Amino acid sequence: MRAVTGIDAGFLHTETPSTHWHVLGVCLIDDRCAGEPFGAAVVRRVLADRLDRVEVLRRRVVDGPLGLTGLVWALGDVDLDAHVHERSLPAGAGLSELAALAGEIGSHPLPRDRPLWELTVVDGLAGDRKAMVAKIHHALVDGVAAMGVLGAILDTEPRPPPSPRPPV
């Protein structure tokens, strides 16, 4: 365990029911050339294989020992079913419908009883595209670090060669 310090502690302490300190990103997915259709099951399988490389996705915020030292980060197992979700838009939906869904996803705080992130796979977009809405607490990442996390768990090629990635 290590202490949550500085601005990260500030984000956690100042969060309210109407002010959430998470970063939200939307990725459009075209899986027509992929070996299998993109979906929550694929995301869970890939994450299960790569979580050891992305420590921030295994961090959970807890009170320090005896409640005396403030908040600390604890590493632990991740229940991927609690973190990876699926949503469907009406068939042929456009970017405005996706943006509205992303706004709705972003309007809810992240539960504090598990690591502070979630991914939502969205289908129903026009052109048989899919999307993924990533929500990660700002205490874990800033915008640049969030891109590094997504880069560690996503591939840009349909069948990438296996390559070890450094931890993020």
Image (cartoon, rainbow, N blue to C red):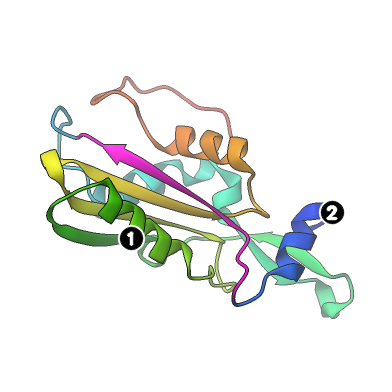
Position of 168 with respect to 78 (left or right) is: right
Picture residue at 82% right of the left edge, 74% below the top: 65
Task: For label 1, count other residues whose C-alpha is less than 10 Å away and answer few (under 14), some (14-19) or many (20+).
Answer: some
List x then y, in percent, for residue 168: 60, 36
Q: Secondary structure at mark 1?
A: helix
List x then y, in percent, for residue 124: 15, 52
Image vertical order of residue 164 relative to residue 18, above or below:
above
Residue named by callout 2:
6
Q: Which of the 4 image quarters holds residue 167? A: top right
Residue 31 part of the magenta segment: no
Residue named by callout 1:
101
Picture residue at 34% right of the left edge, 26% below the top: 156
Picture residue at 48% right of the left edge, 68% below the top: 107
Q: Which residues make up the magenta segment?
A: 18-30
Separation (CA) of disc 1 from disc 2: 32 Å
Q: Can the viewer see residue 168? A: no
Image vertical order of residue 83 relative to residue 168, above or below:
below
Position of 73 with respect to 34 (left or right) is: right
Mark 2: amino acid: Gly
In the image, 78 versus 149, the foreground residue is 149
Image vertical order of residue 31 relative to residue 139, above or below:
above
Picture residue at 79% right of the left edge, 61% below the top: 10
List x then y, in percent, for residue 88: 20, 60
The overriding secondary structure of the stretch rendered in magenta is strand
Q: Which of the 4 image quarters holds residue 37? A: top left
Position of 96 with respect to 56 (left or right) is: left
Mark 1: amino acid: Leu
Residue furthest front as drawn: 96
